[in-house]
């Protein structure tokens, strides 16, 4: 057994006096001899190595985490927080701008509506006035035509009436001549008619 | 039946020269299965963060979410317990948590659990308490006595309270070390014992006759192993978490000495 171990391990084994730990099989054999010693964790000859290795490994792990990974993760989280905050402010300002624009647009619409209403009223008034004027002109024209027509009718009637008198006189002259065989003059007829008319 | 304690044996993997520490004696620096388990755990942690933060983006990928989740979890814990000043202890607590968690978890997959070695848990506990004491003295100086003398307690009570406080402070590294060690040791022993039952009862049942009933017991043991394994995963996480929480609590005692918040 001692022949297989390195001189160094031999020295360790000699120092501890308990057994010579060298290879896996030999440790198991050593355990067999030491089984009454209780938990393997309480065998102090392995404490030193474990503790030193633990501190070495822990130190390396700590340095790597503290100097590389934690700052990396912290940075990305801070960046994210900043990005989100920035986006929120930006969104808020955009919203405010949109609201202002919406308000401006509303005001413009109201203004336009008022203007349109004014225009409509004005146009209506203008149209009514124009209509009234043209109606008046037409009325005057029609009235004039009517007056003219009436005058013409009156003239025609008067003429007709004078004709009727003439015809009636002639008819009466002929009737008197037929009935009495006497010739009567137109003057006589006229006189008689005038008397009759007077009566 | 296999010896349930065999899994805790330290076995050398690579022989390395030992060196002599004055006053302590020779320290065998050989790489053992314990060293391998610690190295594997540390490597796993480094690989985990190397992978999850490789392409760190503002909009995280799936892996980055996991990495950041662990980070935020411990970050919230440290800041929650110690307050804003706790940020400077965050890397230490984070390393402690990740390292213990990795060692606990690897113990469930591999053959050796580094945290079931008292040398490991005691070192971590002593290191934590030393940081507490050194930082406490640096920060508070002579006011450190307030740690053992609660304010607002009448003097005749202090005669009783102060020794208790001192004793409880001295016991902190002990409980810190033994809690983790005991949980890991007990869990793995129970797993091994139940797993041993499966084999031995199965072998007994194979002899035939009435002993055939042993198959039932073996099956029950197997169910027990499965259930215990699930429980051990919980314990593995919980003990790492408890260690980190207690480290935070102890640090908080000296960081916020005198003003409880």
Image (cartoon, coloured by chain):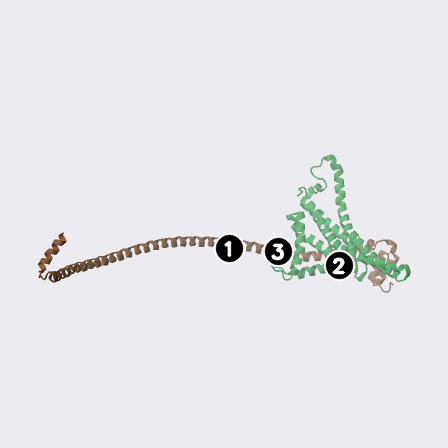
Q: Which of these two is toward me, A178 or A194?
A: A178
Q: Which of these two is toward me, B177 or A86?
A: A86
The residue tagged 3 is A77
The residue tagged 2 is B106
**For residue B221, which quarter of the picture?**
bottom right
Front: mark 1 or 2: 1
- Chain A shown in which color? brown
Q: Residues within 10 Å of mark 1 (few under 14, many from 20)?
A: few
Of helix, strand and loop, which one carries label 3?
helix
Instruction: Same chain for labels 2 and 3? Say yes or no.
Output: no
Of helix, strand and loop, which one carries label 1?
helix
Q: Chain of mark 1?
A: A
Q: Chain of mark 3?
A: A
Tell me if residue B137 comes above or below residue B33 in the rendering: above
* Residue under the image location 74 percent in, 36 percent down: B157
Residue B53 in the image, given as x and y percentages of width and height: 65, 60
* Residue under the image location 77 percent in, 48 percent down: B175
Q: Earlier in the sequence, mark 3 or mark 1?
A: 3
Outermost residue on the front side: it is A180
Q: Is residue B9 visible?
A: no
Which chain does green denote in the image?
Answer: B
Residue B55 in the image, given as x and y percentages of width and height: 63, 62
Image quadrant in which the N terminus of chain A is located = bottom right
Q: Is residue B183 visible?
A: yes
Of helix, strand and loop, which one carries label 2?
helix
The residue tagged 1 is A94
Residue B36 left/right relative to B51: right
């Amino acid at each position: 057994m001692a022949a297989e171990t390195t001189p160094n391990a031999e020295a360790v084994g000699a120092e501890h006096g308990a057994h010579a730990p060298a290879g896996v099989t030999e440790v198991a054999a050593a355990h067999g001899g030491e089984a009454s010693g209780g938990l393997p964790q309480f065998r102090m000859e392995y404490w030193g190595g474990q503790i030193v290795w633990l501190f070495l490994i822990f130190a390396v792990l700590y340095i790597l985490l503290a100097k590389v990974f934690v700052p990396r993760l912290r940075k990305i989280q801070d960046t994210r927080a900043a990005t989100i905050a920035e986006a929120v402010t930006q969104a808020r300002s955009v919203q405010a701008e949109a609201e202002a624009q919406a308000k401006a647009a509303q005001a413009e619409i109201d203004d336009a509506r008022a203007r349109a209403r004014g225009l409509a009223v004005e146009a209506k008034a203008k149209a009514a006035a124009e209509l009234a004027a043209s109606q008046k002109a037409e009325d005057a024209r029609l009235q004039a035509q009517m007056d003219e027509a009436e005058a013409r009718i009156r003239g025609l009637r008067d003429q007709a009436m004078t004709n009727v008198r003439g015809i009636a006189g002639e008819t009466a002259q002929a009737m008197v001549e037929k009935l009495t065989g006497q010739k009567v003059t137109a003057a006589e007829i006229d006189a008689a008619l005038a008397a009759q008319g007077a009566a | 039946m296999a010896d349930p304690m065999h899994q805790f044996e330290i076995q050398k993997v690579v022989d390395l020269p030992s060196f002599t520490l004055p006053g302590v004696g020779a320290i065998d620096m050989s790489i053992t299965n314990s060293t391998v388990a610690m190295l594997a755990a540390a490597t796993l942690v480094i690989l985990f963060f190397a992978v999850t933060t490789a392409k760190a983006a503002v909009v995280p990928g799936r892996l980055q979410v996991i990495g950041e989740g662990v980070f935020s979890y411990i970050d919230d814990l440290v800041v929650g317990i110690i307050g804003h000043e706790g940020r400077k202890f965050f890397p230490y607590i984070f390393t402690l948590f990740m390292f213990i968690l990795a060692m606990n978890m690897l113990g469930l997959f591999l053959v050796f659990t580094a945290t079931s070695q008292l040398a490991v848990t005691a070192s971590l506990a002593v290191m934590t308490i030393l940081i507490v004491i050194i930082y406490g003295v640096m920060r508070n100086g002579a006011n450190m006595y307030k740690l053992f003398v609660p304010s607002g307690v009448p003097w005749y009570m202090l005669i009783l309270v102060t020794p208790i406080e001192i004793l409880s402070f001295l016991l902190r590294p002990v409980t810190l070390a033994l809690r983790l060690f005991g949980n890991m040791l007990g869990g793995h022993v129970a797993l091994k014992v139940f797993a041993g039952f499966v084999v031995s009862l199965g072998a007994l049942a194979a002899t035939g006759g009435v002993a055939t009933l042993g198959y039932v017991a073996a099956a029950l043991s197997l169910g027990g192993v499965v259930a215990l394994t699930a429980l051990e995963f919980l314990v593995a996480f919980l003990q790492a978490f408890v260690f980190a929480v207690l480290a935070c609590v102890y640090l908080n005692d000296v960081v916020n000495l005198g003003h409880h918040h």
